[in-house]
Image: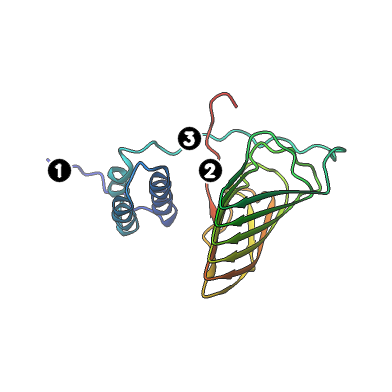
Amino acid sequence: MSDPTPAVRASDAEREQVADLVRRAVGDGRLTMVEGDERQRAAYAATFRHELAPITADLEPEPTAQPSRPAVGKEIATRPDATGSVAVMSGADRSGTWTPGLTHRAVSVMGGTSLDLRHANLDSRGLTLQVVSVMGGANVDLRGVGVDVTVQAFALMGGCEVVVDPDAVVEVTGVGFMGGFADQAGAPSGTPGPRVKVSGFAMMGGVSVTRRPLAVESGQ
């Protein structure tokens, strides 16, 4: 006897969620680029929810809960006006508990920079990030920051990826010449959160903005 329960159609958001998990698996080395491409094409071609489940069955599931965003207090008296990170044919990693200046400049020349702001000490004055990538790359994680952030990006034969919260209000106004600014964030989900403004110039390079849930991390 056939199952009378009809198949449930998948939404664009559900397809994008699966495709994003596949992209991260490729970045983590859990899937090859070929496998990732095949699975992403399958995700975007899926019509029903049950077609999405096998695509990520052997990958870790999306988190079912998110830790609360830390409260942003008064101005931090010891917060400097400016700080910086430089990676020239090398790497620069700022993560954990650290205090960026009101303006933080990150320069990558044939190197890579990772700016993880998830546990950074910020205040109500917000943050301006000046990201320069010349034949290099930069990753900026703004999940959970709880304040408005302005990203001024310059990419020359390089790239910059900005990751924001699902509820962030994103404005992308950059200009591309033989390159581009990709606003893959879409509309915020739930109550609109802090504002993230991304501007700048990309030549033979790219700047992208994506949304990603803040994973629950043990011991944090």
Q: CA distance from mark 3 to mark 1?
A: 32 Å
Percent of width and height locating residue 196: 67, 55
x and y percent of residue 158 in the render?
54, 62
Side (left or right) of 64 relative to 82: left
Q: Position of residue 207 (x, y in %)?
A: 56, 62
Pointer 1 local density, CA inside 10 Å: few below 14, some 14–19, many at least 20: few
- The quadrant where residue 175 appears: bottom right
Q: Residue at x 69, y 50 (%)?
A: 194
Mark seen at residue 2: 1
| Disc marking residue 213 | 2
Precedes in sequence: disc 3 or disc 1: 1
Q: Give 52 or 160, whichever is nearer the viewer.
A: 160
Please identify the residue farthest to the left as the structure is shown: 1
- Residue identifier under label 3: 64
SS state under label 3: loop
Residue extending furthest toward the right: 77
Q: Three-letter amino acid code at disc 3?
A: Thr
On screen, residue 137 above or below 31: below
The picture places residue 94, in percent across and down from the top left corner, at: 64, 41
Q: Nearer the viewer, residue 169 or 196?
A: 196
Question: What's the distance in space between the residues labelled 3 and 2, CA to CA?
Answer: 9 Å
For marks 1 and 2, give the CA distance: 38 Å
Determine whether label 3 and label 1 are within 8 Å by CB.
no
